[in-house]
Amino acid sequence: MAGNRTLTIIKPDAFGAGKAGKIIAHLEAGGFRVVAARVMHLSTAQAEEFYGVHRERPFFRSLVTFMTSGKCMPMILEKADAVAELRRAIGSTDPAEAAEGTVRKLYAESKERNAIHASDSDENATRESRFFFAEAGTL
Ligand code: ATP
Ligand code: MG
């Protein structure tokens, strides 16, 4: 059965531009509840570990530079079928291809500077929640 929690990050482009409040309001209006949240500036080592699955991709160094360029906002969100629902709510990786009304369509700048991250499986949601919130298992 699909889980009811997932991990999101408001990325440095959106956080730095003061869009965090609007994005959270948009997600709450879509039925998500914020379970945990923090504001932090990722180190290079943290960004490399978090996006480690993309280590061999040509955009990896640029992605790490972007993700360490300013503060970001990791959050655990709750909703029935949370992983699939949040992926739908954020839209395609490239905002040019994202559906109307999605977070990336509304707030992303480019395929790299695309405003928000969302876990892509229940397994990764659990792993990524623990990455940012040591207390995730008790929330
Ligand atoms: P995320 O994992 O951040 O939720 P995603 O699952 O939609 O995004 P991934 O394929 O996992 O997309 O890529 C991770 C991130 O790497 C993207 O969100 C984007 O910031 C960046 N990225 C992906 N593909 C490219 C690309 N071709 N050029 C530049 N940046 C890219
Ligand atoms: Mg991804």
Image (cartoon, helix red, strand yellow):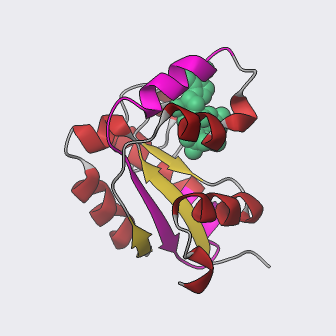
Q: Position of residue 52 (x, y in %)?
A: 70, 36
Q: Position of residue 31 (x, y in %)?
A: 43, 75
Q: Position of residue 35 (x, y in %)?
A: 45, 77
- Tally the marks: 0
Classify residue 3 by image quadrant.
bottom right
Front-lying residue, 58 or 33:
58
Residue drawn 62% across the image and 22% down it = 60
Image vertical order of residue 112 relative to residue 18, above or below: above
Magenta span includes 83: yes
Outermost left residue: 18
Magenta span includes 29: no
Residue drawn 74% across the image and 36% down it = 53
Front-lying residue, 133 or 1:
133
Classify residue 29 by image quadrant.
bottom left
Q: Position of residue 121 (x, y in %)?
A: 73, 58
Magenta stretch in the rendered image: 58-86
Q: Quadrant of the N terminus?
A: bottom right
Camera sees residue 83: yes
Question: In the rendered view, does 87 fall on the left or right side of 23?
Answer: right
Front-lying residue, 77 or 25:
77
Outermost bottom residue: 138
Outermost right residue: 1
Residue drawn 29% across the image and 44% down it = 15
